[in-house]
Amino acid sequence: MKNKKNILTIYIPLILIAVLTVLTGFCRDFIFKNINALLKAWDFDMDFNISPSLAFLENFEYDTLLEIKWILTFIFSILYLIISLLVIKLIFKKRKYLMITVGTYVGITFFSIIFMAIGHFFPGTSGKMYEFARYFMGMAQSPIILMILIPAFKLSEKENNKRTTT
């Protein structure tokens, strides 16, 4: 009976969250690839047939699309933070791990802002700093952080169990 309860309370929600994670990733990829292709088409004065579901983006100016990308970056980072928190809560049920997860996302965002600021105030470094910031924010918009935190928390619990049994 206990195994059935575990399946219903842990595994089914985890499967649903995994499906949500995949769908969020596909949605993010679809939106950003279309926006980036539209921006590139405008940069090089080329034609680009944007997906019909995103055709309304053609009505925006170039700078507005860049601002939309920043907003979407923030939104998708928050979505992945929420997904990560749900998974951590389901698996570990420890407030400490939830706080570490939030701290990780805040830290990554903070470092990205620092890199962007350095690039802004030191123009010769702007391209490299943007790449660093984009790399870090790419991690925040994917399940990579979760893929690092789960094994880290598992190892932490294993170490804590070793200390308490010896």
Image (cartoon, helix red, strand yellow):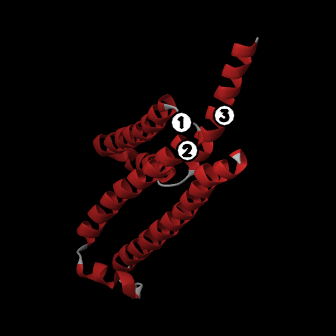
Q: Position of residue 93 (x, y in %)?
A: 53, 36
Q: Are marks 1 and 2 in contact (CB under 8 Å)?
A: yes
What is the secondary structure assignment of the residue under circle 2? Answer: helix
Residue at mark 3 to residue at mark 1: CA–CA distance: 12 Å
Instruction: Give left or right: position of 55 versus 140.
Output: left
Residue 166 found in image quarter:
top right
Amino acid at the residue labelled 2: Leu
Look at 47% across and 31% down and name the residue there.
95
Closer mark to the observer between disc 3 and disc 1: 1
Identify the residue position indicated by label 3 in the image.
Answer: 154
- Mark 3 lies on a secondary structure that is helix
In the figure, residue 125 lies in which quadrant? top left
Residue 52 seen from this side: yes
Mark 1 is on which residue type?
A: Lys
What residue appears at the point 53 percent right and 60 percent down from the top-left corner? 21
Horizontal and vertical percent for residue 163? 70, 14
Q: CA distance from mark 1 to mark 2?
A: 6 Å
Give above or below for 46 relative to 94.
below
Percent position of residue 146, x then y = 56, 45
* Real-space Cα separation, disc 2 to disc 3, in angstroms: 13 Å
| Left or right of 117, for residue 152 | right
User: Front-most of 129 and 78?
Assistant: 78
- Earlier along the polypeptide chain: callout 2 or callout 3? 2
- The three-letter amino acid code for the residue at tag 3 is Lys
Q: Residue at x 44, y 32 (%)?
A: 99
Give the mark toward the camera: 2 or 3: 2
Residue at 39% in and 51% down:
78
Q: Secondary structure at mark 1?
A: loop
Q: Badge 1, how many Cα within 10 Å: few under 14, some, many 20+?
A: few
- Disc 2: CA contacts within 10 A as few (<14), some (14-19) or many (>=20): some
Number of the label disc, if any, that sits on residue 93: 1
